[in-house]
Image: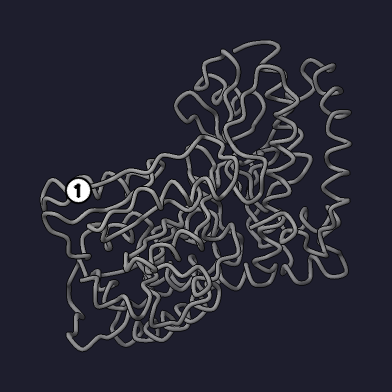
Amino acid sequence: MIQDELKIESIPESAWQESRRSFMKRLAGGIAAGGALVAGYGTSTAASPPQDLDTAVSGTDPGDERYWHAVRNQFLLRDNLALMNAANLCPSPFPVMEAVFKYTRDLDYDASFQNRIKYRQIREDTREKMARLLGAHPDEIALVRNTSEANNAISSGYHLQTGDEVLLSDLNHPSNKSAWEVKSRRYGFKINYVSVPLIPGGEDEIIDAFERAYTPATKVMSFTHVSNTTGLSMPARQLCATARERGVFSLVDGAQSFGALKIDLADMGCDAYSGSAHKWFMGPKEVGVLYVRKDSQDAVWPSIVSAGWRDDVDSARKYEVLGQRDDAALTATGRGVDFHEKIGPDRVEARMRQVATAIKEGLTELPGVTLSTSMDPALSGGVVIFKPGDLDPRKVFAKLYDTYHVAGAGMGPNVRLSPHIYNTLDEADRAVAAVAEILRDGV
């Protein structure tokens, strides 16, 4: 995406700029207070759901921060916790959480075949919702268990042999890198890696690097859409178009884009796409999505076959014959789509970017901090990676949580903050102010 595409009317650019202008003033106040950021916290134990989201935000414009406070209240989050770990695990909003509880109770109350038969239709309803959200046809959607399983369905199911080549980004997640490497040792195909700069000068630099790496033997090209280790967002549409022009199968690992970015798979043009519900989608645990383009399904065999298999299945459903599933979680996945659509996928993306941008802009003002994630919206998503000067990043990661109640991740020599729609702009400022205090006081 380019910057102009992010200007959603309901979140005007003025709101972004106001956040930026007020940040340094609040940051200075936090540092001056010396310990002002160290606040007490409680453990939220709310047992009853909040107002329905439509009711809670009624009459409030999404450009108003109160709208997003109402969204945050849809989550059972610990008081004063700035949870910024969406790249790893997100909480589910109340409607999703309650659906898991409701249908788990139903299954435990009556696990008979007669009671459970209704879940077949509910699963199909969920598939249709997911297809609508992702710009696909229901026959192209398999409901699997996570991104890792989806990626491995492709690397195990696409037939490769000695002499074939697979083209991978060197930023790929292990489920889309190590998995291919293990299989290359087994089947004898070759892997070529594409390296791009930490912060490229533009999308063309990435596209050119991939184009130079193709050979006549390349059969598969795969990349992680948004890197979990650098925050780099790949130009998916252009990379998939280049692969298709060469007759090369393309797999996009969407672990860090599914639920964060507005995705239109028909427009993206990939042959396969993977995602996990437990990350940015904010859905139930152990549910994932595997998209396989209709005209590409004959090239991918199912890697797991169990009870319920039928030879005449001519759709992506053949990739989800996985044995007994958690019907409650699958049902709640449909509620997750409902939640996204109530807010709007484009609005979810814009808000996520707004909070992530506030954090990146704040971090760039701190002496000693090295930001590894591009400021360009076309080259970044919601994953923010930075090096905290000469401090031990693991200790910074720990102190952010233990002292300041900011939950991120330690990533090798870096710290990762990955905010989402349940984070407020005040939390973005608080996170940066906490980093500033740690840099000043040490760990």
Alpha-carbon neighbours of circle 1 within 10 Å: few (<14), some, or many (≥20)? Answer: many
Q: Is residue 118 above or below residue 256?
A: below
Total labels: the figure holds 1
Q: Nearer the viewer, residue 407 or 311?
A: 311
Quarter in which the N terminus is drawn = bottom right
Q: Is residue 224 left or right of residue 31?
A: left
- In terms of image quadrants, where is residue 194? top left
Estimate the x, y position of residue 94 in percent, counting from the top left: 61, 62
Q: Is residue 311 left or right of residue 289?
A: left
Q: Is residue 53 above or below residue 23?
A: below
Snapshot colouring: one colour
Q: Nearer the viewer, residue 5 or 55?
A: 5
Q: Is residue 417 left or right of residue 187?
A: right
Q: Which residue is mark 1?
A: 190
Estimate the x, y position of residue 280 in percent, counting from the top left: 55, 55
Q: Is residue 152 above or below residue 131?
A: above
Q: Residue at the spot x=22%, y=65% of the render?
A: 158
Say which amino acid is labelled 1.
Lys
Question: SS of the residue at dot 1?
Answer: strand
Q: Residue at the spot x=71%, y=63% of the render?
A: 347
Q: Residue at the spot x=48%, y=44% of the render?
A: 227
Estimate the x, y position of residue 417 in percent, counting from the top left: 59, 37
Q: Residue at the spot x=67%, y=60% of the render?
A: 348
Quarter in which the C terminus is drawn = top right
Q: Nearer the viewer, residue 393 or 166?
A: 166
